[in-house]
Image (cartoon, rainbow, N blue to C red):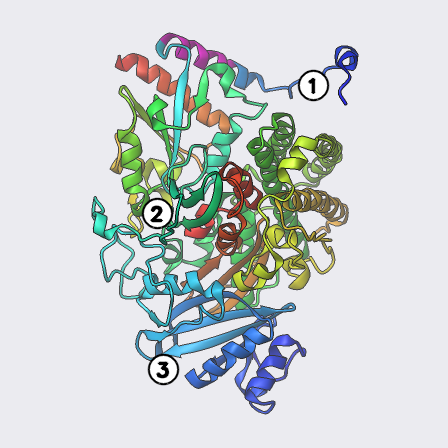
Amino acid sequence: MIHGELPQENAATGALRELFGAAAVPARITYGHNRECSIDVSEPEFDLAIPYLASRKFVLISLFCVEGFRKEAQYSLLYVFERKGSILILVRNLTGNRTTSIASVFPSATWPERECRDGFGIEFDGAFDTRRLFLHETFPAGFHPLKKTVPDTPVKTSDTISTAEEYPFRKMSGEGIYQVPVGPVHAGIIEPGHFRFSVIGETVFNLEIRMFYTHRGIEKLAEGKDPRDAIKIAEAVSGDESAANATAFCMAVERLSCITVPDRAWYLRTVFCESERICSHLGDLSGMLTDVAFALGASQFAVLRELMFRENEKLSGSRFLRGMLCIGGVSRDIPDDTLAGFREFLVQFRKQYKVGLSIVLSTPSVIDRFSTTGVIKKQLLRPLNITGPAARASGGRVDVRVNHPYGIYDRFVPKPQPLKDGDVLARFTVKAAEIMDSLDLLEQLLAAIPEGSVRSEEPVQDGHALALVESARGQSLCWIRIKDKKIDRYKVRTASYCNWLAIEHAVPGNIIADFPVINKSLNLSYAGTDL
Amino acid sequence: MVNAFSCLVKKKVTETRPIPGEEIEKLGREIKREIDSRFGHSLAIRELDAGSDNAAEIELNNLSNAFYDVERFGITFVASPRHADVLIVTGAVTHNMEIAARKTYDAMPSPKFVVAVGDDACDGGIYKGTYAVRGGVDTVLPVDLKIPGNPPTPVQILTGLLALMQKAKNKS
């Protein structure tokens, strides 16, 4: 942490100056390695800051609890805000386990507050939703697994759920409204989640989602581990985002330990992350086409995706690029002829991709199904903190690679092309364009990759740091605190966690048969949400 | 407007399949032979994610892409456990999925087989002994075969399915 002078005037420091006075600012703020400002606030200051930040269009991108972060308080809540590429963290130190909710001002606090309640037993007064989140009904009452006093050992859960204990979905009533419950086990080969549709005729009137069926205790699992042994945990957050989440994890540890990653390692990491983005987007394009029964187009992209997986295997030995990231760089170098082979592959790949895309874009029946389906309105982006391609398809100019460049993205700048319509077609088009953009980036990276070492052996130190990366689905946030060389707290918030709530707004008004394609167009990771 | 004549003379929209590996073809032929003789030409698989990180799901989906196209060997992925011969379970079984996993298994008609796919499904993997999971699939359901891997590749999954067919033969 750096104390003292402001590194740069930005929206966050400006807000703090107005809130707490110019004199108080330099003395109280600490700056993270991401140039994020962090400030401890008293309750009256917090109450003052929240409406102010809301009026200044700050977005609440994360809220989480840390135990033992400050000596004077057992629990500290960290509220992470973003505005125009600047990050502001308000640290609220709690006396006891009761505090106030901000979910009515910042709706994106709803899930995190429920999460803090499940994890640490913190009660939020004034919260409009106090149902459990990641601990479902079978977990015993009063069990809060993220507390330091609770060991990470097997728990006795109940085998049945009585009718009285069933999760209370929001009640929808009215003439002709009926319910369609779907999940957690779905018809396809996909992850588990529950969708509760309230339908009038064929049209969805309301959709409520319930997640966290694959809650595996990732955050607790990392605690007490040597950071070098925990990368496989970061990779397991979500299979198709292994490289992105591992990059975020490594970046946070490197920042708090002041480790400098060699240039060649950053090139390789960026190659992995962009390849991963291409794989993920190809799966989405293929999936969207499958869901409108256009098999010809779907199989084009599925073939390309398989080819890309095979290239991943050639590069890293893993089709999901696992085991390559390590703290300080990458675990092993990739020979130049392998990289040259990959470069040649990409030339062919690009040609084939263009053919596939032209088939789709010249098929009116596909365009007809995509267009005006599942619209996400732009005004939802900020309150719900919608991120990634989903936000860019609704006119949002958000991309961590551009707004908070990390690694070598300041030298290799992606060119996101936001669209305005916010429908399935816009998301399809944005993702299709991003594949081309990633191909351009890969081309430039492979042409310019320098010689040199791929790993720094500097030691891990104690401290805490925040890292943001742009995964295929959008902004992925990772906050790590290391104490006595071991992980004390690992907080992950993937893009899916933010975007899931968007689907509740995108689906109503559409017919139920369009739900799969809307869901696929957002391509949300259940595992990355449930942790 | 579609001209009926042009449909006759126009070249058909088709292309050659990507050249599959001989390994897959050989494996496929063997599986098909087993399925034909034991399962009446069709093996119906229901997939259940009981706490996976979605990598295994991606590989299972990949079995249907043009490189593997396992339907030609008689393998189909079905939408309901009531139509299934085999339940493929991925992930360490979480407490939040445990009841659903049991219900899915109970809904299958007998005889039925359970295959655990991936390291976490085999024995709990990195989640073994933690608060959120029950453990490997065998802590909840009777498992007939385990296919390890993080995640196993499509070829490894196919190899596993062949082993299951042979096991089923010995069992009966």
Secondary structure at badge 1 equals loop
Q: Amino acid at mark 2?
A: Tyr
Which residue corresponds to mark 2? B127
Residue lying at the far top in this picture: please name it: B37
**Disc number at residue A72?**
3
Q: Residue furthest bottom?
A: A23
Q: Residue furthest front?
A: A175
Residue A246 visible in the snapshot: yes
Per the image, the residue denoted by label 1 is B15
Q: Which mark is residue A5?
A: none
| Whole-percent x, y for residue A431 in the image | 65, 44
Q: CA distance from mark 3 to mark 1?
A: 69 Å
Residue A50 vertical placement versus A17 (above, below): above
Which numbered mark, 3 or 1, is in the foreground of this view? 1
Q: Nearer the viewer, residue B168 or B109?
A: B109
Magenta highlight on residue B28: yes
Chain on which label 2 sits: B
Q: Main secondary structure of the magenta part?
A: helix
Pointer 1 local density, CA inside 10 Å: few below 14, some 14–19, many at least 20: few
Q: Quadrant of residue A455?
A: bottom right
